């Protein structure tokens, strides 16, 4: 017989992941974007170099935005990056809040008095 691997596996050494506060902030934004009708699906990819949260308009398309956490860039350009659908970096920074600002601006609506 084969080797039985227990599920779930413990986090691999050297794997990058989101902390609870970071993931809460990202999922809060995701929930508001779903409620506004902009996004419908998401994916999380945890790798050795980066942790990536991808948000999709439809599941069959490329992600509209990717929120990437790359700790190797912490002392250079900042470990957080907001990547657009075409693959261009929209915003990069050391803190998550300012990096998410361009997406949060899409939720603002002008209210007429």
Image (cartoon, rainbow, N blue to C red):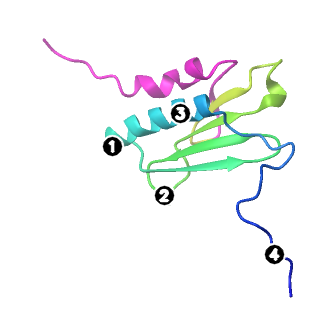
In the rendered structure, are the residues bearing label 4 and label 1 in contact, judged by CB atoms less than 8 Å apart? Answer: no
In-front residue for pair 83/51: 51
Sooner in the amino-acid sequence: mark 4 or mark 3 = 4
In the image, what residue occupies the spot 58% across and 37% down? 84
Sooner in the amino-acid sequence: mark 3 or mark 1 = 3
Q: Is residue 11 left or right of residue 3?
A: left
Residue position for label 3: 24
Spatial CA span between label 4 and label 1: 43 Å
Q: Secondary structure at mark 4?
A: loop
Residue position for label 1: 37
The disc at residue 88 is none
The disc at residue 59 is 2
The disc at residue 4 is 4
Q: Position of residue 26 (x, y in %)?
A: 53, 34
Q: Nearer the viewer, mark 4 or mark 3?
A: 4
Q: Nearer the viewer, mark 4 or mark 1?
A: 4
Q: Secondary structure at mark 2?
A: loop
In the image, what residue occupies the spot 81% across and 75% down? 4
Q: Position of residue 98 (x, y in %)?
A: 57, 17
Sooner in the amino-acid sequence: mark 2 or mark 4 = 4
């Amino acid at each position: 017989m084969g080797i039985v691997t227990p599920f779930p596996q413990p986090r691999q050494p050297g794997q990058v992941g989101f902390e609870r506060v970071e993931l809460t902030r990202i999922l809060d934004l995701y929930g508001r974007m779903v409620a506004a009708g902009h996004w419908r699906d998401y994916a999380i990819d945890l790798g050795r170099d980066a942790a990536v949260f991808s948000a999709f308009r439809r599941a069959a398309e490329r992600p509209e935005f990717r929120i990437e956490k790359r700790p190797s860039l912490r002392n250079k350009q900042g470990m957080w990056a907001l990547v657009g659908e075409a693959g261009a970096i929209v915003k990069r920074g050391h803190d998550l809040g300012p990096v998410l600002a361009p997406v949060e601006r899409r939720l603002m609506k002008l209210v007429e008095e």
